[in-house]
Amino acid sequence: MSFTYAPAPESREIVTLQPSYDLFVNGDFVPALSGRSFSTTNPATEEPLADVASAGPEDVDRAVAAARAAFEGPWGKMRGSERAKFLFRIARVLQERAREFAVLETLDNGKPIRESRDVDVPLAAAHFFYHAGWADKLEHAGLGPAPRPLGVAGQIIPWNFPLLMAAWKLAPALAAGNTCVLKPAETTPLSALLLARVCQEADLPPGVVNVLTGAGDTGAALVAHRGVDKIAFTGSTEVGREIARAVAGTGRRLTLELGGKGANIVFEDAPIDQAVEGIVNGIFFNQGHVCCAGSRLLAQEPIAEPLLERLRQRLDTLRLGDPLDKNTDIGAINSKDQLDKIRALADSGEKEGAGRWSPPCRLPARGYWFPPTIFTNVSQSHRIAKEEIFGPVLSVLTFRTPAEAVAKANNTPYGLSAGIWTEKGSRILWMAQQLEAGVVWANTFNRFDPASPFGGYQESGFGREGGRHGLEAYLDA
Ligand code: NAI
Ligand code: MG
């Protein structure tokens, strides 16, 4: 029996969009010296949302100078217990304005309101709360008796979790006593600009947080600026490589959080229904725009067929459509470029001989959409088994023994995440030791907590974010 749902759209009244947005520098919104701007759109409707300033090198100069002055002035001299109060305030205002942030994030990004409301915004607030607690305890972080902040941090973030990534970057940097210049992604600048308003509301001293909107050239100018002491980047491996080259030999600090091709490994003794939910959450959460997505399912041969059968049934119940509808499971692809990339990779899967399946589902006429898709008969040499698709596409492979599962899971240049599904505790521990991945989930997937460090191996980058380990990236011991 299948149920039908009446639409339950969240109202967008709570969000007041400005026709245009300036840069946030030294505590104020100021027009870009570059004189340039770009438009950000709602990917579910292709409706332009606002015109946003595009920062040029002269704007980067100005923001870095403001951040330097704040570091050498009030913020750098402030006691940790005082800094903590600002982080607590930001966290509280985020909670108070949670619905506004959720709706804005969904409009600009295309992700379902259920996810922005239940995951992105609460986790962003949790990161500020968690790091507020560290601000006056840094000497107990195990990084030496008197760790010092690095100075000005240049932080470049992607479009898949715009507000959450801003929180991941800002909260530890500020807790450790640094000042920040944040560059959000060009398709999703609006929640970072609202967060800048929250910084004003929290009376954060001018220059402690600066937000420069713009595209890759703005990011590159920030990376090149010699006044920046530390670069933190989350995004593609390709751009990560470019940044590593630019920073090499300058003595400046760098952390990179890049792509992934995570294996979700299901053994024959796994609790099947739970595993199916974990597989769905692993690859269809946030349309698969997740660096640690479980994009490769490794199923043990005896259960591969029944598991796939249940998975197909479950996919049949997923609801794709209006991201503001509270019943929606799968929202829009973030941009036309990303949609083109997903389409090209999915087509390559078919050409290389894998079996493609999607549940019957009608895609809206406007906007960027891709149906949840499963590929079977995937071999390790297929592009869809090797390359990050960053979309709602699952590649299914099989294995016989735990050793074969490990070999296949590790057969990737990446190493960000993995999942293990089995009843057997000893096997979980053995597998977790063998898997070359920064995060290994057992009988769950895509679980995040600010106290838990997150980061990769190999081409997934280096450095950790979150937890005690994450503080290290912003401190000189
Ligand atoms: P991207 O790496 O180009 O963009 C990420 C951020 O870097 C954005 O803020 C962008 O403006 C900035 N940027 C771009 N070029 C730069 C440069 N030369 N110097 C400094 N900053 C620069 O990622 P894009 O093009 O949006 O996505 C391409 C692919 O990258 C995706 O299909 C996905 O596979 C992967 N990706 C991975 C992410 C992750 O969380 N690991 C996030 C976003 C994308
Ligand atoms: Mg947008």
Image (cartoon, rainbow, N blue to C red):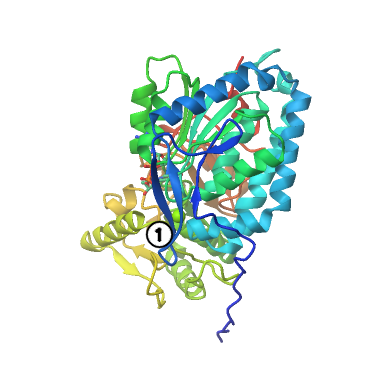
In which quadrant of the rendered image does the C terminus lie?
A: top right
Ligand 1 shown in quarter: top left
Which residue does the image show at 32% across and 47% down from the upper left?
A: 386
**Residue nearest the viewer, comparing 256 with 53:** 53
Horizontal arrangement in the rendering, residue 310 relative to residue 379 (left or right): right
The reply to whether residue 450 is visible in this rendering is no
Residue 391 point in image, percent of width and height: 40, 57
Horizontal arrangement in the rendering, residue 460 relative to residue 441 (left or right): left
Residue 178, picture quadrant: top right
In which quadrant of the rendered image does the N terminus lie?
A: bottom right
Badge 1 crowding class, 10 Å Cα cut-off, few under 14, some 14 to 19, many 20 or more, is many
Q: How many marks?
A: 1
Horizontal arrangement in the rendering, residue 457 relative to residue 173 (left or right): left
**Residue nearest the viewer, comparing 82 with 298:** 82
In the rendered structure, which amino acid carries the disc numbered 1? Leu
The residue beneath circle 1 is: 394
The reply to whether residue 324 is visible in this rendering is yes
The answer to whether residue 455 is above or below residue 264 is: above
Extreme residue toward the bottom, this view: 1
Which residue does the image show at 24% across and 58% down from the upper left?
A: 348
Which residue does the image show at 49% across and 44% down from the upper left?
A: 417
Residue 368 point in image, percent of width and height: 38, 64
Residue 18 point in image, percent of width and height: 54, 54
Residue 103, picture quadrant: bottom right
**Label 1: which secondary element:** strand
**Residue nearest the viewer, comparing 10 with 262:** 10
The answer to whether residue 164 is above or below residue 367 is: above
Residue 349 point in image, percent of width and height: 27, 59
